[in-house]
Image (cartoon, rainbow, N blue to C red):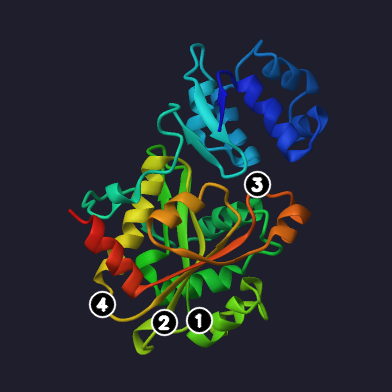
């Protein structure tokens, strides 16, 4: 994560990350290019109505924009690659899963995915992931939520802005083995591939996306997942394909192992980490709980 102390520095890096010019950004905001220049030089701040526009245009978390777009800004760490922020150097890393497994705190900011606006935010995030060639359809997410509402969740900040989500696809072991052998990809998954996991002896909970814009929100999402798995007493397979560079540590702590990683694709897509397929199961997860649950 990079430390930002001004809205201007954030905008400059956004343009570099998105490969757009000042003129392009001015067009998106419907302002004169001189306004963009003044913002980037920190000569003026964004007006309140432009903060909401900036969230929509840049997909940067609202809290980051609010912290920096102030007469006395709040220095904030932010990573464009994983859409994640932190208020301090200490809390930049993902939380230790040992803190998550016994959490009982709930929040009304977390709910089941159901609106078209939810789907738009999730797919927008998906497009940021370097390994995602084409996001899955809205119909697949909606069907997955119908079948597995417990861990198809979306979270918002205290101002009502999107802050992260869980998208898990319930699929058969047969289909997962094809993904494992790389004869099909997650992009090939359709509505017809999703299963009623309650009727299968060894269902696969396939993590399509798991993202929180800060540790607190990630904490709630991870706890949601772990609580579901703690209550699921039958055999299952947990799997996740991701190129996020911050996911390796927490997966390793949870006892999840790497099935394969694609270093060739990593070079092609210029990813900070190789796209990896992770896997776990009921026995591995229960072993983790037995070792760490207080």
Q: Are marks 2 and 4 in contact (CB under 8 Å)?
A: no
**Residue 251, position as x, y percentages in the image:** 44, 57
Decide which of 101, 165 is in the foreground and name it. 101
Quadrant containing the N terminus in the rendered view: top right
Mark 3: secondary structure: loop
Residue at the spot 66% in from the left edge and 79% down from the top edge: 184
144 vs 125, left or right, is left
The answer to which of marks 4 and 3 sits earlier in the sequence is 4
Depth check, mark 2 against mark 1: the one in front is 2
Q: Which mark is residue 203?
A: 2
| Few, some or many residues within 10 Å of mark 2 (<14, 14–19, 20+) | many
The answer to which of marks 1 and 3 sits earlier in the sequence is 1
The answer to which of marks 2 and 3 sits earlier in the sequence is 2
Instruction: Estimate the spatial distance between the alpha carbons at disc 2 and disc 3, rounded to whole Å.
Output: 31 Å
Total marks placed: 4
* 28 is higher (above) or lower (below) than 294: above
- What residue is shown with label 1? 194
Instruction: Estimate the spatial distance between the alpha carbons at disc 1 and disc 3, rounded to whole Å.
Output: 31 Å
* 14 is higher (above) or lower (below) than 8: below
- What residue is shown with label 4? 233
Mark 1: secondary structure: loop
**Residue 89, position as x, y percentages in the image:** 45, 27
Q: Are marks 4 and 3 in contact (CB under 8 Å)?
A: no
Depth check, mark 1 against mark 3: the one in front is 3
- What residue is shown with label 3? 272
Residue at the spot 42% in from the left edge and 46% down from the top edge: 156
Q: Are marks 2 and 1 in contact (CB under 8 Å)?
A: no
Work out whether residue 110 can be spotted.
no
Depth check, mark 4 against mark 1: the one in front is 4
Instruction: Estimate the spatial distance between the alpha carbons at disc 2 and disc 4, rounded to whole Å.
Output: 12 Å
Residue 265's quadrant in the figure?
Answer: bottom right
């Amino acid at each position: 994560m990079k430390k930002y102390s001004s809205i201007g520095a954030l905008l400059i890096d956004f343009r570099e990350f998105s490969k757009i010019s000042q003129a392009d950004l001015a067009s998106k905001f419907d302002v004169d290019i001189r306004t963009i220049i003044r913002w980037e030089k920190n000569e003026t701040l964004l007006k309140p109505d432009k903060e909401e526009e900036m969230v929509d245009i840049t997909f940067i978390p609202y809290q980051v924009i609010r912290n920096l777009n102030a007469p006395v800004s709040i220095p904030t760490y932010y990573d464009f690659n994983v859409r994640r922020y932190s208020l301090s150097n200490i809390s930049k890393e993902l939380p230790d899963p040992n803190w998550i497994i016994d959490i009982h705190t709930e929040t009304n900011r977390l709910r089941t995915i159901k609106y078209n606006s939810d789907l738009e935010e999730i797919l927008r995030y998906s497009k940021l992931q370097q390994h995602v060639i084409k996001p899955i359809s809205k119909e697949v997410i909606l069907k997955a939520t119908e079948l597995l509402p417990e861990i198809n969740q979306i979270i918002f900040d205290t101002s009502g802005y999107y802050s992260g989500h869980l998208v898990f696809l319930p699929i058969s072991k047969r289909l997962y083995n094809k993904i494992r052998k790389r004869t099909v990809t997650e992009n090939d998954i359709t509505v017809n591939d999703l299963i009623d996991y309650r009727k299968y002896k060894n269902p696969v909970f396939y993590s399509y996306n798991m993202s929180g814009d800060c540790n607190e929100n990630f904490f709630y999402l991870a706890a949601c997942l772990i609580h579901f798995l703690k209550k699921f007493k039958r055999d299952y397979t947990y799997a996740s394909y991701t190129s996020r560079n911050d996911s390796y540590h927490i997966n390793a702590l949870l006892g999840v192992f790497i099935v394969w990683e694609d270093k060739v694709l990593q070079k092609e897509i210029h990813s900070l980490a190789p796209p990896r397929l992770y896997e776990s199961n009921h026995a591995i997860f229960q072993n983790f709980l037995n070792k760490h649950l207080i």
